[in-house]
Image: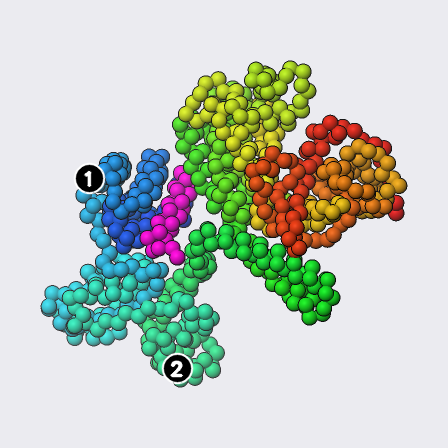
Amino acid sequence: MIAPLETFQIEAREHLVNLEAALLELEEQPEESEAIDTAFRAIHTIKGAAGMFGFQQLTDFAHHLETALDKLRQGKLDVSKTFIEIFLDAGDLMAEMLEDTEFSAGQTISSEKLLERLYQIAPEDDPRKSLIQAPEVQGEPASEEAIYRVRFKPDRDSFKNGFDAMPVLRELTSLGTAEVICKHENLPAFNQLEPQASYLSWELLLVTEASKDTLMDAFMFVADEWQIQVDEIDIHDTDEDADKLGELLVARGNVAKQALDEALGEKPAIGSLLKEQGVVQEEEVKAALKEQQLTRKVKAKKQAGKSQATVRVPAEKLDSLMNLVGELVIVQARLNQVSDAVNNDDIEGIAEELELLTTQMRDETFGIRMMPIGSTFGRFRRLVRDLSSELGKSIQLDTQGADTELDKVVLDKLADPLIHLIRNSIDHGIEPTEDRLALGKTPTGNILLSASHADSQVVITIKDDGRGLNKDKIKAKAIEKQLITSKDQLTDEQIHQLIFEPGFSTAAKVSDISGRGVGMDVVKRSIMELGGKLSIDSAVGEGTELTIRLPMTLAIIEGLMVAVGTEYYVLPLNNVEECIELTQSNTHAKTRRRIVELRGQQIPYLSLREWFEVPGDEPPIQQVVITHSGSERFGFCVDEVVGQYQTVIKRLGKLYEGVSGFSGATILGDGSVAMILDPVALIDSVSSSEFGENTTQPIRMQS
């Protein structure tokens, strides 16, 4: 159970993330009103909730920021670089303030300094006094925007008693967006008017976040003498007829339901009909039409911004749920084995039903853990902004595929490696403005961060248009550090991969940002621990592209189980294309890597029996499982293809961290263990081994 205070802190941090994203958008598009509204809502929400939990200094600080943002909304302040910097720093300070209700002296000093900076760009003669004494709306705000129909008629002697309707109208209209209708149907003839008598009445349609009690406070001194009626209009009603003019007139008490039904039988416009029949006055029809327009507008706005109800659950509970689902999958596999063994129709039916429910539960649990990768993009925009400013470079970050979903566990562990790679692109990749101009490039460097799904994997790329990697410089540094020798013949990719060696750096000097050779090896290790692969493509003067391929989840996958002797292995099903037969008569070659010809295409394959040195004789007919990684195809020769298998991934211990070709293990229904193969890692291992260079003549498949 999450405590209310902890819930507030979590939600406040989410609002600060939204604030930062809105500010960065405003910096690029100063006229973007939606970004201004987002920033205002974030500060307003934090301010309103902070006081309830004893964060009084945070509430006071947020109030000043809210007032400034309100002036921005009204056009009294302009978006400037200074304005954005002040609010970004303010967001950072508010994040610190959320840690404890007892604020430190340093935080107090920092808040005062920030407010001084804010006062300098405020247009008032005495901005500090103006900000501090900004009027507060009394009463508790409603949890969401609502529409109120406010009707009031001052008593006949109001003017004589010193009361006027205008102050009431000003106070009400200050609470939100209002439509004001003045009704004068009771005016006497001109020669019968009494100058000190009140004849008018008013109706307001008010869209506000204030509560009904707050609205009634406006009538505090006249509540006993005036005729006052405040009704909330139901904007949650899904009835399509609820906001039709006739229904509104009935709801407002202007028309009887019977009179409406009689008029509807005559078909013309209902407003005109009712006026002609003398059932309702023209002013009431106009007021109802305004209410109709306003209600429909607010309903449409709410529907557009409507979000699904959510329940906040600790991440540990989701992990526990996934573990339980994994155990359920294992039990279900065991039941299937028992069902096959006893050959009982009732047990088979139960097993099939449980398998269906288990699959649905697995998919639903996956859905809960999946999050859009765009939820982390905001922090990278801030990183690029701050570092480019610090280095005196002009850099633009573009993002694509923000809605690409990834397991939350993977996403959390991916954040730090991505930050380090982007920092590296900013520091080493993008050139200073003067260097870019000299090279004929645009003065502003560009970094593209994109994400997409491919073959049940998530592919993330970080691409810059900077100076690129200098292969000669990297190779010389690697020789100096004795990582390679001058005689080694390396491909471009192998040279590029040297930057991920521990302690490797080509930086001429150490800076606060990089240059110590610490970090890139950790980045690669972190990605490999997630079951991912990191590749580099770079050209001098054109830029660098880093590609990360990751599994969408680290918990359960669909696999293809295969057998070699008494050993069982699982290949990820998303990598498998097809299975073909291979007879013993044409497997005469004894090298580990072989070639099979399939429909005119030569495909290399690997014998898992030989690779893992499984004892025993080969069966007369073997199976080759054809897999793919990107556009590359590769086969794995096995004794038997057992079939599709829901695979619960169990991470390997530290003893197996250096073993290539495995992404984990799984427990079978009978309690035995099957290793989960990593096809990409196996292909790389074969290619880099001494046996990988040996091939035979193509083996032609029998039809």
Q: Which residue is mark 2?
A: 257
Seen at 16% across and 68% down, the residue is: 222
Query: Can residue 517 be seen at all in this image of the molecule?
Result: yes
Q: Quadrant of the N terminus?
A: bottom left
x, y (%) of residue 570? 68, 47
Are circles 1 and 2 on residues that touch, CB within 8 Å? no
Query: Can residue 69 be seen at all in this image of the molecule?
Result: no
Magenta segment's dominant SS is helix
What span is in magenta? 1-28
Seen at 67% across and 64% down, the residue is: 352
**Residue 125: mark in rendering:** 1
x, y (%) of residue 545? 58, 32
Relative side of 159 to 252, left or right: left
Task: Between residue 391 and residue 181, name the one nearer to us.
Answer: 391
Relative side of 392 to 227, left or right: right
Q: Is residue 379 above or below residue 540?
A: below
- Disc 2 crowd rating (10 Å Cα; few below 14, some 14-19, many 20+) is some
Residue type at the position of mark 2: Lys
